[in-house]
Amino acid sequence: MSAALNTFFYMGGYAFYVWLAVVMTVLPLALLIAHTRWARRALRRDIARRQARERRRMKAETHP
């Protein structure tokens, strides 16, 4: 690695604390994004199931 890049990653002796802070910021944000996407997909599946059920119910009522 070049000296400038090595100096950047070393952070003047505070690398552990700086990179720990970066990880402790990025990791929860990534988990929040993943959870939000998962919950959105689950909600859309639930809505689709309810709509399909309602369509089946309406069809059954109109065609006895």
Image (spheres, grey):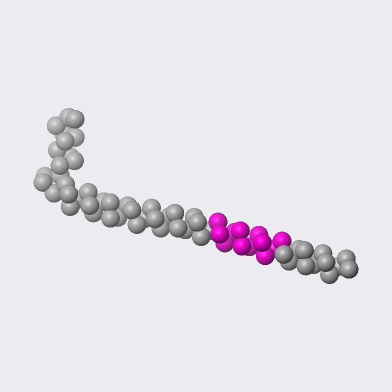
- The residue under the point 59% across, 59% down is 44
Residue 48 vertical placement versus 15 (above, below): below
Q: Residue furthest right?
A: 64
- The image quadrant that residue 11 belongs to is top left
Magenta stretch encompasses residue 25: no
Span shown in magenta: 41-52
* Count of numbered circles in the view: 0
- The residue under the point 88% across, 66% down is 63
Q: Residue furthest top?
A: 2
The N terminus - image quarter: top left
Indicate the position of residue 28 as horizontal and vertical percent values. Answer: 34, 57
- The residue under the point 30% across, 55% down is 25
Indicate the position of residue 59 as horizontal and vertical percent values. Answer: 82, 64
Magenta segment's dominant SS is helix
Is residue 31 toward the left or the right of residue 17 in the image?
A: right
Is residue 35 toward the left or the right of residue 16 in the image?
A: right
- The residue under the point 72% across, 64% down is 53
Residue 41 vertical placement versus 58 (above, below): above
Is residue 61 toward the left or the right of residue 51 in the image?
A: right
The C terminus - image quarter: bottom right
Indicate the position of residue 8 as horizontal and vertical percent values. Answer: 18, 40
- Looking at this view, is 62 or 11 the one in front? 62
Indicate the position of residue 36 as horizontal and vertical percent values. Answer: 47, 58
